[in-house]
Image (tube, rainbow, N blue to C red):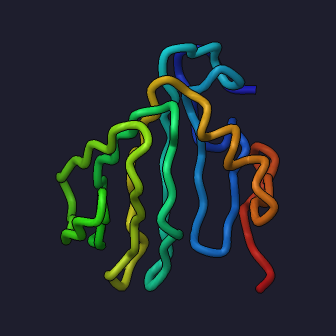
Amino acid sequence: MADENFVQGDGVPTQLFDWGKLKWMASPEVNDCERFSAGVVNLEPGKGHDLHTHPDSDEILYVIKGEGEQTVDGDTREISTGEMVFIPEGVEHGTFNTGWEPLQLLAVYAPPGPEAELAEAPESEIVPPGEAPTRDD
């Protein structure tokens, strides 16, 4: 299990999808974080996820590296390193990697909850801490 205040990526599970992977490094399950959750998202080149909403949580996406398209409430824009996107609760949104390398994002939900819903999705594979996340497609 992760240290409560200092969390390494190999100390938390990986949520693996056909479009990429997520590591939630601040959440009620990891370190009793009750007001928000935060994690690193890696979207593979040419991949994205369907438009969706989080009815009870605001979301912030910060682009750590890469480039892509972000749709928020029907408005699609190019995003790249150093940009931040705010998505209010209940607003439809989606992200697509338009680049040749992984699009890496810091995702924050307030309050937490959507990260647990993602873990329960039928297309999600949970890889235990310390194991290399790979997908057989």
The residue at the point 47 percent across, 65 percent down is 51
Q: Nearer the viewer, residue 19 or 74?
A: 74
Q: Compared to 30, does 43 lie above or below?
A: below
Image coords of residue 59 (percent x, y)? 39, 39
Q: Is residue 24 left or right of residue 69?
A: right
Quarter of the figure that contains the N terminus: top right
Q: Compared to 9, does 63 lie above or below?
A: below
Dividing the picture into quadrants, the one containing residue 112 is top right
Count of residue discs = 0
The residue at the point 73 percent across, 44 percent down is 13
Image coords of residue 17 (percent x, y)? 67, 66
Quarter of the figure that contains the C terminus: bottom right
Q: Nearer the viewer, residue 10 or 60?
A: 60
Image coords of residue 21 (percent x, y)? 60, 60
Image coords of residue 99 (percent x, y)? 32, 81
Q: Is residue 15 left or right of residue 73?
A: right
The residue at the point 75 percent across, 75 percent down is 135
Q: Nearer the viewer, residue 136 or 121?
A: 121
